[in-house]
Image (spheres, helix red, strand yellow):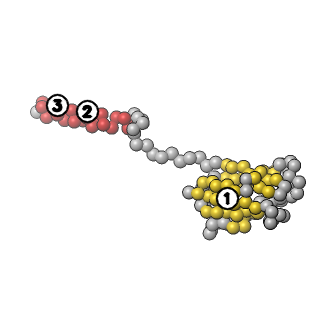
C-alpha cells in the first residue's frame, strides 16, 4: 500500500512538473494569440492629390483624411467602388483644418476620389484580413 501511494505521488509530481511552466507563464507555455489593436492611418489632402495615393491596411483599421491649412481648392473624399455589401459614403467638401475618418471593416479594394477633381485626385485602399 505504501509503495502504491509512493508511486502515485511520484506520478503526480512528474505530471505537475510537466505542466508547471504553462501555469507559471513560462515562455514554452501555450498562450492565446493576442489580437492587435486597430490602427489609424493619416492621408494628407493636397492640391490636387491625396498623399499617399494608395495604402494597404488591415480589417478594422481606420483612415483619417486631413486637410492642411494650405490646401487651396475645396476637396472631399468619396467612396466610388468597394467590396460587395459596403455602403458608399462621402465627406463634406472642406478647405482648411478639417478631417474625415472612416473605419474599414471588410476586406477588399476601395476606390476613392475627390468629386471636385475626379480625373486627377483619386486613391486606392486595400484592406487585408
> Which residue is outermost to the right?
72
Q: Nearer the viewer, residue 27 or 126?
A: 126
Q: Quickly name the residue at label 3.
A: 6
In space, the residues marked 1 and 2 are separated at their CA atoms by 56 Å
User: Of helix, strand and loop, which one carries label 1?
Assistant: strand
Residue at (37, 35) in percent of width and height: 21
Image location of residue 119, percent across then percent down: 80, 66
Residue at (69, 49) in percent of width and height: 41
Q: Say which quarter of the image contains residue 19.
A: top left
Image location of residue 45, percent across then percent down: 79, 53
- Res. 105 in view: no
Q: Quickly name the residue at label 2.
A: 13
Residue 108 higher or lower than 5, as above or below: below
In this rendering, the count of numbered labels is 3
> Contact, CB < 8 Å: mark 3 with mark 1?
no
Q: Quickly name the residue at label 1.
A: 125
Residue 31 - label? none
Image location of residue 4, percent across then percent down: 13, 34
Residue at (64, 55) in percent of width and height: 56
Q: Earlier in the sequence, mark 3 or mark 2?
A: 3
> Contact, CB < 8 Å: mark 3 with mark 2?
no
In space, the residues marked 3 and 1 are separated at their CA atoms by 66 Å
Asked whether, in this view, residue 57 is left or right of residue 53, the answer is left
Q: Residues within 10 Å of mark 2 (few under 14, many from 20)?
A: few
Amino acid at each position: 500500500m505504501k509503495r502504491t501511494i509512493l508511486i502515485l505521488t511520484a506520478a503526480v509530481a512528474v505530471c505537475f512538473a510537466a505542466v508547471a511552466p504553462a501555469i507559471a507563464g513560462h515562455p514554452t507555455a501555450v498562450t492565446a494569440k493576442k489580437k492587435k489593436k486597430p490602427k489609424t492611418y493619416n492621408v494628407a489632402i493636397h492640391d490636387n492629390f491625396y498623399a499617399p495615393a494608395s495604402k494597404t491596411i488591415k480589417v478594422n483599421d481606420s483612415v483619417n483624411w486631413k486637410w492642411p491649412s494650405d490646401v487651396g481648392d475645396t476637396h472631399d473624399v468619396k467612396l466610388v467602388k468597394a467590396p460587395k455589401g459596403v455602403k458608399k459614403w462621402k465627406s463634406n467638401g472642406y478647405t482648411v483644418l478639417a478631417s474625415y475618418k472612416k473605419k474599414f471593416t471588410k476586406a477588399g479594394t476601395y476606390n476613392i476620389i475627390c468629386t471636385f477633381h475626379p480625373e486627377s485626385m483619386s486613391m486606392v485602399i486595400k484592406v487585408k484580413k
